[in-house]
Image (tube, rainbow, N blue to C red):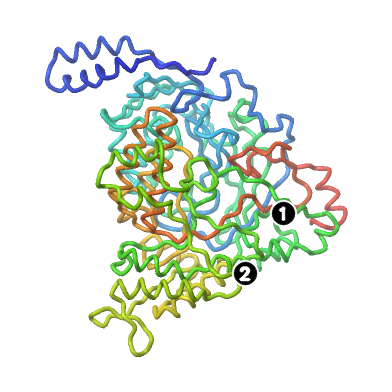
Amino acid sequence: MPRMNARAVTQSQKPLVRLAWSALLVSGLAMVAMAAQAQDEKIITSHGYSFYGDLKYPADYPHFDYVNPDAPKGGEISISTLGTFDSMNPYSRKGRGGVLSTIMYESLLGEGTGNESAPADVYGESYCLLCESLEYPESKDWVIFHMRKDARFSNGDPVTAHDIEFSHNLLLDQGLKSYADAVRKRIPKVEVIDDYTVKFYFTPGISRRSLIDQVGGVPAWSKKWYEETGARLDESRLMTSPGSGPYVIDDVDVNRRIVYKRNPDYWGADLPFNVGRNNFDKIRVEYFGDENSAFEAFKAGEYTFRVEGNSKQWASAYDFPKIDAGYVVKEDIPDGSPPTPSGIVFNLGREVLQDKRVREAVALGFNFEWTNESLQYGLFKPRASFTQDTPLMAMTKPEGAELAFLESFGDLIPADMLTDDAVIPHVSDATRLLDRRNLRSAMKLLDDAGWAVGDDGKRYDANGKPLRLTFLLNSSGSATLSAVVENFMSNLGNMGIDAVLEKVDSSQYTARERDRDYDLVFDGYGAFLGTGTGLAQLYGSEAASYSLFNPAGLASPMVDAIIEASLAAQTKEEEDASLMALDRALRYEFFMIPVWYNDSYWTAYYDQYEHPAGQPAYALGYLDFWWYNADKAAALRAAGALR
């Protein structure tokens, strides 16, 4: 099928469409007019979806370009994680879900194993998996999915339109509140046309961004199973519903390991979407209490693949005998995705942190340059942007299309945001932890904010209340991160702040983070290369007081307005200008101290795995499109490198 680039409704027709919608509310004659016009609107039928209609892969694509279509099936890949789990239901606030516990479920439009992108070499494109085609009008007022009649759950039951309708409604009724609230306003109705055809209707008068993608990405759950068992989506449980995906649960040993096995009867194994993918017979996840024990277990061969996140270990610990002998491969693989906007997040629900001057002062206590050189072996770069190292990253003062976009909001945009360069992190002295210049700047900011220094060197407000900040940290996390935070807190103490580091175990950490029981926490948001309604869930005000996706509780009218305008963009150029403005606005609001980023994946693995020579930009894909070499595995065992 050719790519769908044409617009069925011209620019001159669009005002008539809007006018007809308005008249429909007050006149039966307008309803007739609307129906007549709808008959003229072209219906797009496709094997995939992107907002602008461009798809890299044609309808008859044999496989994704980056996969090895001849990759052998077999073997096991094993990975590690830290902490604990007590549930295999990751869709609930209750309990701590097991790693990869979404792996069994597919959606109408497919995604990669482990929630990575598929295809991983393009951005903003989705292709049919449970569906064989979709159709929608140029207005995108609705979408119809035509499902594959051979799709099956792992228990053999067919996957039908009734299951899709049930799954969509289950998320609204029992899923996360922030998700449900956002979706319910945008998708008012789902209709089962027949057993294998389902239609979603979209609310009139709102942006069409992320609507088709949204409904196409809902996991398909078995309506029959939920009705027979009485299970709920909002409960913690180890029992799981059957999925239609390539993997099923093989074994669960709570707090120790989870094993998934490839379903030999997987219905979709030969689809072009899956060629060269889902190659391992088993995926094993081993749990460890701390990073040191996990690393020692890797050296011993208790698991076989590791994505390293600790710069100290990457720089100094990969010198053990199995590396020297070539049994373990250490590989630095480029990462083309924008880095995750992680850092030290301020809880804006705390009164003391609602003063931007206090946040700016606290930020001056973080010394990236010293941290990177002294604790991280100089391996990181300082992160400034939510779209770091992409064309959407705001740099100097706004100009051109971005400036015009920002000026259209009038007084909602602060004057200095229009005339100053985009906010960038401060620079610190790399030779000493406490940068005296930054300390003086921080002290002045705190003075101006009304936090005076008392006789004991501590800071108090006019009522004698001390300036006290707690930092919540997961005790099972990286020792290097712990050292970074401890040194940061030391600098806060030198400002007169009563800085308290609270290290708690994984279960307590999860519960307190969900309840936003912290002043400061190391967390992250989502990077973006395109606009969509997910931006409102991450950065918008609507669910700011409780959203798990917005750990700062950011609620900014300026950010809300920019997101809404971005959703209304009609061209890629308008979209890019709006997203650059959003990056600039998020940095201006200063709800996070940006820390560092790495533009590659640090991987180490036993030399029994292989991957395509051409790494796609948007996924590492070690669970998705890597494969197992049985001959290499046998050689490792013969040498005693693996059991």
Is residue 313 positioned above or below 444 on the image? above
- Residue drawn at 71 percent across, 66 percent down: 296
Q: Quadrant of residue 16?
A: top left
Q: Is residue 314 visible?
A: yes
Instruction: Tell me which amino acid carries mark 2.
Output: Leu
Q: Residue furthest left?
A: 26
**Residue nearer the viewer, 207 or 506:** 207
* Residue occupied by mark 2: 375
Disc 2 and disc 1 in contact, CB within 8 angstroms: no
SS for callout 2 = helix
Q: Position of residue 249 (x, y in %)?
A: 57, 46
SS for callout 1 = strand
Q: Is residue 542 visible?
A: no
Circle number at residue 74: none
**Image quadrant where one finds the N terminus:** top right
330 sits left or right of 144 in the view: right
Q: Position of residue 347 (x, y in %)?
A: 36, 63
**Residue nearer the viewer, 433 or 537:** 433
Q: Residue furthest bottom?
A: 455
Q: How many residues crowd around disc 1 within 10 Å: few (fewer than 14), some, or many (20 or more)?
A: many
Q: Residue furthest front?
A: 419
- Residue drawn at 75 percent across, 62 percent down: 318
Q: Position of residue 492 (x, y in %)?
A: 44, 75
Is residue 395 positioned above or below 86 on the image? above
- Residue drawn at 64 percent across, 50 percent down: 600
Q: How many residues crowd around disc 2 within 10 Å: few (fewer than 14), some, or many (20 or more)?
A: some
Of callouts 2 and 1, the N-terminal one = 2
* Residue occupied by mark 1: 604
**Image quadrant where one finds the C terminus:** bottom right
- Residue drawn at 43 percent across, 42 percent down: 580
Q: Position of residue 233 (x, y in %)?
A: 39, 47
